[in-house]
Amino acid sequence: MPIKPITPLPRRTASAALALTAAVALAAQATPAHADSNAVPTYEVKINLTTAALDSAHAPLAAVKSAFGITGSATSRSYAYYDTDAQALDGQGWDVRLRHKSGKDFEETYKKRFAITGGDIDAALDTANDAGFDSGDTNYEAEVDWGYSKQTLSFSNEKSHSASGYSGTALPTGATGLGWLSKDLPGKLADWNSDGWGTDTLAAARVHGPVTSAVYSGAWESSDDASIEVVPVVAASGSGTEYVVELSFKTDSYDDAADLHADAISVADAKGWLYKGDILKTQLVLDRY
């Protein structure tokens, strides 16, 4: 039987094949390769309560403590944030905080936030990975903050500074604190956006705060790290004091966090203590101080 000659691809088909090959190659170049897998976050459920949960001394009611397993007496902590008047760092999702817990060294925290849309934590982790925040960077701890209706992914770089010479929860002057934070500035923030952007922006920052809060600790359901923090802040009018009440639970498990979130809202709502919204303490301090 005679062998039939091979029919060459029509010009249009061959061109289409070449175009497809080129498109695949371009797509591969455009898709960033993740050097490491996504970070694995822990979870902190944060539910705000109304001031109906406080007594006349602005401490949690005994019934509130009992309902959420709070057994510890109050401890104090003071903290302040550093940003420009225009909040340039916050505008890029960065928070720079100096905190002093009673009897402890100062804590310097540099935190980068990524929005979580529609509960899609994996998508936020992908975005963070593309920005260099992945499982291989052990300088940052990943956490999902789970509020009443909002979730945020954050990566925190924690450093410390000796509290020698400072008693209680006292903080240094704004200039001194800025000097400490600038000296310890991590590389990711130092060169965020462009070389030296973070360094220059923090150098132009000022102190916002401080505030001093009372924290009551305990354990509830699956979380052995439960707390109620009462934070006095300057009222929006500029005079007087408002009290922010935050109930929080930490856990390593998404499923546990989901249960804690649902149960805390249910209990607080049934008791008439629930604030049906999300109060961002960082933003309040930046805006009001």
Image (cartoon, rainbow, N blue to C red):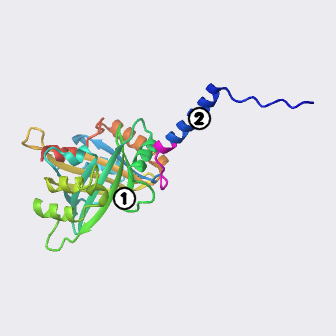
Taking the magenta stretch, the answer to whether it contains residue 132 is: no
As helix, strand or loop, the secondary structure at mark 2 comes to helix
Q: Kindly identify which residue carries mark 1.
A: 140
Q: In this rendering, which labeled residue sits more in front, label 2 or label 1?
A: 2
Question: Would you identify the image quadrant in which residue 179 lies?
Answer: bottom left
The location of residue 207, given as percent across then percent down, is 13, 54
Side of 118 where 75 appears, left or right: left
> Mark 2 — residue?
18
Horizontal side of residue 249 vs 232, given as left or right = right
Find residue 186 and report its horizontal and vertical position in percent.
29, 61
Q: Is residue 35 magenta?
A: yes
Name the foreground residue: 35 vs 59.
Answer: 35
**Image mark for residue 274:** none
Mark 1 element type: loop
Query: Considering only vertical position in the picture, is 57 above or below 105?
Result: above
Task: Decide if residue 154 is in sight here.
Answer: yes
Residue farthest along the right direction in this orientation: 1
Quadrant occupied by the N terminus: top right
Looking at the image, residue 15 sits to the left or right of residue 103; the answer is: right
Magenta segment, prevailing SS (helix, strand or loop): loop
Please give the range of residues in magenta. Answer: 28-37
